[in-house]
Amino acid sequence: MGVSALTASHASRVLSLVNGKAKPSSQIASHVSSSWERCLTQYGIEPTRSRETVVLEAHQLRERQQSFGDLLGVARAEMESLYDQIAGSGYAVILTDAEGAILNTITDPTLKREFRHAGLWHGALWDERHEGTNGMGTCLVERAPVTVHREEHFMGYNIGLCCSAAPIFNAHGEVMAVLDTSSASCGVTRLIHRHTMALVNMSARLISRCQFLREFPEANILRFHGRPEFVGLLHEALLAIDAEGLILAANDSALEQLGHSHRNALVGRSVESVFQFSNGTMQHRALTEPGTIWSIRDTENGRRYFAKVSAPHQPARTVAPITAPITTPVAAVTRIEPAGRQVGTDSRMLHNFHCAQQLFARRVSILLQGATGTGKEAFAKALHKASLRADKPFVAVNCGAIPEPLIESELFGYTRGAFTDANREGRPGKILQSSGGTLFLDEIGDMPLPLQTRLLRVLEEQEIVPLGGDSPIPVDLHVISASHHDVRQMCTSGDFRSDLYYRLNGTTLYLPLLRDREDKTELIQSLLAEECRDQEPVSIRPDALRVLLEYSWPGNIRQLRNVLRTAAALCDERVIRPSNLPQELLDETSGHEPAMLAVPGGDAAAARAPLDSAERAALLRELERMRWNITHTADALGISRNTLYRKLRKHDIPLPD
Ligand SMILES: Nc1ncnc2c1ncn2[C@@H]1O[C@H](COP(=O)(O)OP(=O)(O)OP(=O)(O)O)[C@@H](O)[C@H]1O
């Protein structure tokens, strides 16, 4: 039969079934017949209509993707793992939003044309109103997993497709997205589809579960199940509970386990009215035994469950005391957990770290945004150390520091004899070196546009071709990138590829400025301890500590480290006083010992004329801005390197190692 004859016979089948002329065959699933009816009576569309795929404008698509925030990265990771399981069987993995707009797809590169031809591409609208009965659109209406197989589609032009789709819910039980696998090839049987459906459903549930945990970082999470082996797994029940013991949210499994059909039966109630334990007991367990499974009973039927409870990821804010004793001995440094040692105890940083740890473990790419010296590289290293790949290499590449012509060979490596200056044996690039471990791309905003295209390809295909080489080498890439530029803004101005931005930005974490951190005192102490590792401990007098706590720190933690290093070297009797601190700190933090008074005995700082100290402050500012690169700082100041060195000596400014 020709295409038009096929379409006509399909249309007459649909029409006669909906109009009651044909008996509903037992072969037609109820979700299909209801959808056909909706298409004809509610949306007024005809099965014989020709294809009119409606596609969003690029900026509309971008806005919808952005509204998903971190979840897009989580979903992407899950889509990749789903795709790995069904790769080679002719399927595309597709994510739509709650209105059926395709936000993301993974397709076998050889089938891209086929899927495009079928209207399955980014921005296309696949809700029932636009495309009639289909996996994604019908799943949105049914709010349940559905398979729509070939002639079950409403539109004649869609009858070559086979789709399995499952809804992704938020913590309030609303459908926020649909995960779908579609095949445009005719060889796929229903049996294969049943298998695929199970995989899709499982992935969608995993994403929903992740979304639930993301929505309540400040709540206790109670996980339970009638069988102990299911606690911590996909089917576990989840309740988010606030500090007062009020239930904030429940997942579907919690409703099922407790025998309720609606969230209202649980949300808003106290946990004590649902289970036979007190809120106090639960909070205590969350803090002291988060890993232990204990037995609980519900209040209604006395049924037994097994449970675990974890404390909020985002701890209550604690303000560091600034009224320190006369001296703050270094030995009293607060203990910080080893993996997070380079992260600190600031609540935003801890929250960032917990989020990043969970996402990174699921192969979500992390983008760190923060001003210079806020600890982006330190954070990335801590994340790597806390991951399962801690024993594999952590490879950092500063895209802003490598001269543009060298970035390509640095990243991708080259083969023997690739170009005249090349090392004779060739060299593996940083990407290959990082395979299996972590690749940290610092100052990603400085990567030239042509290389952005190559990097995107490597990330998509997980293989590289070194310069001069012709066969691809598979790589196992886990990327953390960082920038002090606003990379999203750079996409708008055309300086950064949006597709690479979305690939790198599974999630963006913003690192706070040092002046806004809650853990400044601890940071000062731990940095000082590090700086004096091999020497007698150094203490800080309270008035000096107050200056350090009140200064604005434009160069953030890096500047703090340099200031402490200098102060520790200059101080008498192993005690840092205000006079050991740079003049601009004292100038800015008024109300503390002015340098002229602070330094008895004609210290050099005390004798500094105002013009001198202004020059010193300007030098330090520029050095910080240029990340202590002498050539760049001299250029920025319009002086020679020699003059700069002379000025550094004159102002006692030591260079960092
Ligand atoms: N939590 C921390 N505890 C102790 N030291 C830290 C911490 N975070 C960062 N540092 C130190 O601060 C300095 C700057 O950190 P890092 O290089 O990670 O910053 P960055 O944001 O990557 O800087 P840039 O943007 O200039 O590349 C380093 O000496 C690092 O060891």
Image: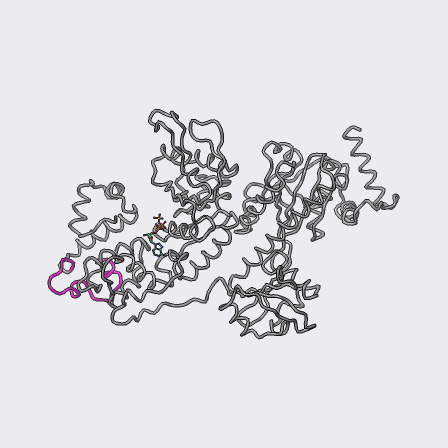
How many marks overall?
0
**Place of residue 418 in the rendered image (x, y in percent of width and height, measured from the top left):** 39, 26
Regarding residue 275, the answer to whether it shows in the image is yes
Residue sitting at x 22%, y 56%:
566
Residue located at (76% from left, 47% from top): 35
Q: Is residue 210 left or right of residue 551?
A: right
Q: Residue at x 21, y 51 (%)?
A: 654
Residue 327 x/y as whole percent: 25, 69
Above or below, comparing residue 364 to residue 587 in the picture = above
Q: Quadrant of residue 518?
A: bottom left
Q: Is residue 152 left or right of residue 321?
A: right
| Residue range corresponding to the magenta coloring | 584-605
Q: Position of residue 583 (x, y in %)?
A: 21, 58
Color style of the picture: one colour
Horizontal side, residue 225 vs residue 323: left or right: right
Q: Is 514 included in the stretch rendered in magenta?
A: no
Residue 577 appears in the picture as rendered: no
Q: Nearer the viewer, residue 528 or 586?
A: 528
Name the foreground residue: 11 vs 312.
312
Image: 176 above or below 324: above
Quadrant where the image shows the N terminus: top right
Q: Is residue 593 magenta?
A: yes
Residue 572 lies in quadrant: bottom left
Between 461 and 492, the one lying in front of the other is: 461
* Quadrant housing residue 297: bottom right
Residue 203 percent across, percent down from the top left: 62, 49
